[in-house]
Image: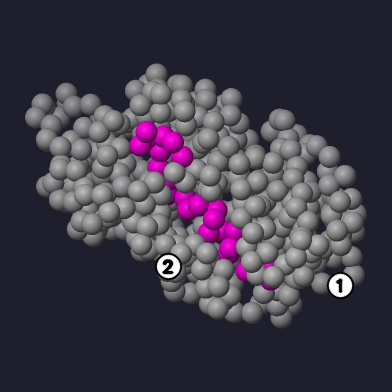
Amino acid sequence: MRTPRLVPAVVAAAALLLAGCVDSSASDDGPDGPGSVRLYGTDGTMQDAFGSGLVDRTVLNGMKGTAPLNPLPAEFTNRLLAVDPALEGFLFSGETYDAVVISALAAELAGTPDPAVVRDYINTVTTGGTPCTEVAQCLELARDGEQLAYRGVSLRERGFTEQGEPSAATYATLHFGRQGFIEQDKTEFVGAGDAAAVTEADPPEPGPRPTEPAFDREPLRIGGLLPETGDLAFAYPPLIAAAQLAVDEINEAGGVFEVDVEWFDGDEGSSVEVARESLAAHIDDGVHVIIGAAASRATQAVLPDAVAAGRILFSPASTAAELSGVESDGYYFRTAPSDLLQGAALADIILRDGNQRVAIIARDDAYGRGLSQNAEESLRRLGVTDAELTALTYQPPEQEDGPVPGVAELVDDVTAAEPDAVVLIGFSEAAQIIQAMVDEGLLAEE
């Protein structure tokens, strides 16, 4: 396990990774031999649940990829497993937990659940005050009017930028093993980001404490906008478990304004239409803070509606770079780091395996296009020429579990490119592309 390190700028992330990671090109776990290429993935595919979409998950043996992920303490993952013993992974669980806790701390300091007031406290809850890590400790400080520097599960080194997102992040390099499951003991961690980008805004003064009896106080209402269904449904369990854990621990510590926080379920559905319906239901229910969406496309689509209704949208998993500094009137935040950083991390692991010709197959949406572009730029900075780089996109299925349009043509394009490495940037539907590559002999079946 590596100790996360910070670098002074995003553009230095690739150099840091090249200097700080071990050479894995000699690994004997990857698919080598005639008719095979190396597979790489990102946070949308690098999860154990992804293999369930394949005829034989062992074809994932040797696949590597990146994901925003801290080395999670066993004490935290054990608490998550107490919520859901069937969890198969923990991706974005720390980010979800922190988003809920930060929202509660900001409301407690504001002295009101009103989103128009709470939004002014969110960034500065993470910077400049008394450091705190535990929910009960942080809430007690907030009740006393202390300014905070929350350091939770995902937000460890630095606080938020002026744009309301992490100024630094830790990435994991993940490896699928021979049985088609991620081998945790091979995971490496490296930090990247701009520590100087932390907001320098002075924290607002704590709001007045509620004076009415506790039973008359309006509770803080938090709603989920998470992928219960759709292409990202396989990533839902750790997100909802983390949200439930955070709410439970906040309430065990006395709640906000000495009143239990209320949680409202809501499905993102990996669909703009479903996400908008869930957001509208939350607005009707008087929800103050919405945790989501996970997919960047859904976040982009519903953000104007959230802003118009004066609701805070706080994403734990939307990583599209174009969401940095998006116009939101101060109502949008995320604990998920920008894909500007992940693109550099992905380029590094591809090149340190000795690959020269790279094909990138990306989902045609904000997440896929943005991360593909960032990876392409990083690969070019590290010496890959345009002739050695092929960038392809595909349309997501129109319906959940539906076919990816044009898979056969996509695989033909990959075959023509003769790559050493193929990068899949997508969600559960990307398993269809891998299966088609297996069927065409591009990947070696174990």
Q: As rendered, which of 250 and 27 lies closer to the eye?
A: 27
Residue 236 against residue 158 in the figure, above or below: above
Q: As rendered, which of 225 and 357 lies closer to the eye?
A: 357
Magenta stretch in the rendered image: 326-351
Please, what is the three-letter code of the amino acid marked with disc 2? Pro
Quadrant containing the C terminus in the rendered view? bottom right
Mark whose residue sits in front, 2 or 1: 2
The answer to whether residue 206 is left or right of residue 73 is left
Q: How crowded is mark 2: few (under 14 residues within 10 Å), some or many (20 or more)?
A: some
141 in the magenta segment: no
Please say whether residue 431 is visible from this viewpoint. no
Residue 5 in the image: x percent, y percent?
43, 71
330 in the magenta segment: yes
The answer to whether residue 358 is left or right of residue 274 is right
Residue 176 in the image: x percent, y percent?
67, 64
Please say whether residue 144 is visible from this viewpoint. yes
The residue that label 2 is drawn on is 8
Judged from this view, the residue extending furthest toward the left is 211
Residue 22 lies in what quarter of the image? Answer: bottom right
Q: Which residue is drawn at 37% across and 63% down?
A: 195
Residue 62 in the image: x percent, y percent?
72, 67
Q: What element carries label 1?
A: loop
Q: Residue at x 41, y 49 (%)?
A: 165
Q: Which residue is drawn at 83% across and 43% down?
A: 407
The residue that label 1 is drawn on is 33
